[in-house]
Image (cartoon, helix red, strand yellow):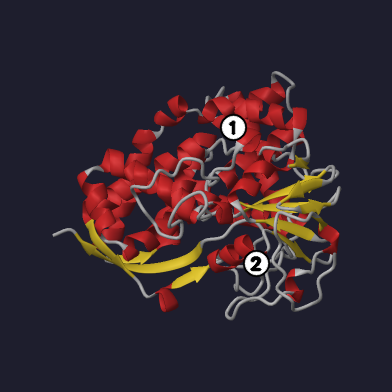
Amino acid sequence: MTSPAHVDDRVTDTPTVRGDSLPYSHELEWPTGLTPWTVIDETGAQGEPYAHFAWMRENHPVLRVSHPDEDVYFVSRYQDVRKGMRSPKILNNQVNDVPPFAFPTLLDGKTHAKLRKVIASAFIPKAIALVEDRVREVSAELAQSFVANGGGEVVEQVSRPLTIATISGILGVPIDDIEKMNFLADKLFVLFARVSRMAPGDADDERYANELFAYLNQTLRRLHAEQSETVAGLIARAWLDDGVLTEDEATELCAFVFVAGFETTERLIAGGFRELRADPNLLVRIRANPAEDGEKFIEELVRFRGPVHKAPRRAVDDIEIAGVVIPKGSIVRLLLASANRDESRWPHADEFDIDREADGHFGFGHGVHACLGAPLARLESRILFEELAKRAESVHFDPDADLELLKGSSLTNGVDSLVVTVTPVS
């Protein structure tokens, strides 16, 4: 069944249709103010995508989008995303025939399990608790300086310094090299998106990524010689002592831990400032009851503004979702952020509610590919906002002038830059 261009055909669960007979996103009649959904958001039109998601859930829960490489199917409803996340044998996490890097997010099966096992012990809650004092110390320093200065740019002055300092300490990277590592890690993320996520990339991304790999290779050798107990020390021993990892796997896994350890958490924290502006009472509650309300704030923040919006998959066989048979071999993107705003799962899902039971969200993934670093992200975010709430009465900014959202990404969304003013506690 083929629908003509510019006809808003509502896709229902019956009758079943083949995905390759659906109209493309750019052929549909989108509501006023919404541009057709694209694979790569190069213009920034999808920087705040929740209105797109709501329309997709209601009208086209499986949306076919054209891309020069191949068609991509976007899945937006909670139950359908859940089905996709729970079907790893039909929807493979490994979308490339030959994965470009030894990143757990690019792999399935035994190799994926092997990489996770090497680093899993470093990210269990007991291990994360050992870095809490350091996170508290850095968070307090950053919050104190930020409030004393009346605010500033959130990413560069708060969220990135905290997350970089934390993951560098866990890995064993010298603090003097943080600035260099920050730049190189950004380039690696760009290369990763280009070779595995259909993003455009940069002309120099591969050169700088190789520079990062070389640096981390030497770091692994140094930490092995020092018998370091850091995460990178564990990876080094898995390579040089146990032979569990090859040299390339060890180097690339170390790079993955570094990039994954700060890039998403810094955007999550920056997104939290948006909610503090919308509801100043949140600071009051966190200040009065940091243990309970601080945790509730972060969990709802992960649901509401989780930075990882899409989970790419490859269909190894035909799979039916929402009445659409997605053909074998197709690229599927499970819209985690859309599922997290689905009214069928959470009433008033487009409202931030600190008292909501947010269990079941996909902010940290799900199943065998759930984020290993979730306990660390929760810890950093909670402590940062606890320390901020001790010192700040309110947060203000002009959304039109002070907020820039990420664009050009095929995987993550959120704050790219945010300038705020802070009123200190009397």
- The percent position of residue 336, horizontal first and vertical second, equals 59, 51
- Identify the residue shown where x is 43% and y is 51%: 301
Residue at the limit of the structure toward the front, as seen here: 15
| Number of residues whose C-alpha sits closer than 10 Å to that of mark 2, classed few (under 14), some (14–19) or many (20 or more) | many
- The percent position of residue 287, horizontal first and vertical second, equals 23, 48
- Identify the residue shown where x is 72% and y is 32%: 112
Q: Earlier in the sequence, mark 1 or mark 2?
A: 1
Residue 211 horizontal side relative to residue 95, left or right: left
Instruction: Name the image quarter holding residue 41.
Output: bottom right
Tell me the residue that label 2 is attached to. 408
Q: CA distance from mark 1 to mark 2?
A: 31 Å
**Label 2: which secondary element:** loop
Residue at the limit of the structure toward the bottom, as seen here: 32
- The percent position of residue 231, horizontal first and vertical second, equals 56, 31
Which residue is at the front of the view, 300 or 156? Answer: 300
Instruction: Name the image quarter holding residue 423.
Output: bottom left
Residue 396 in sight: yes
- Identify the residue shown where x is 65% and y is 33%: 368
Contact? badges 1 and 2 (CB < 8 Å): no
User: Which amino acid is tagged 1?
Assistant: Ala
Q: Which mark is residue 232?
A: 1
Instruction: Name the image quarter holding residue 105.
Output: top right
- The percent position of residue 163, horizontal first and vertical second, equals 46, 47
Which residue is at the front of the view, 352 or 190? Answer: 352
User: Which amino acid is tagged 2?
Assistant: Gly
- Identify whether 111 is placed above or below 165: above
Q: Nearer the viewer, mark 1 or mark 2?
A: 2
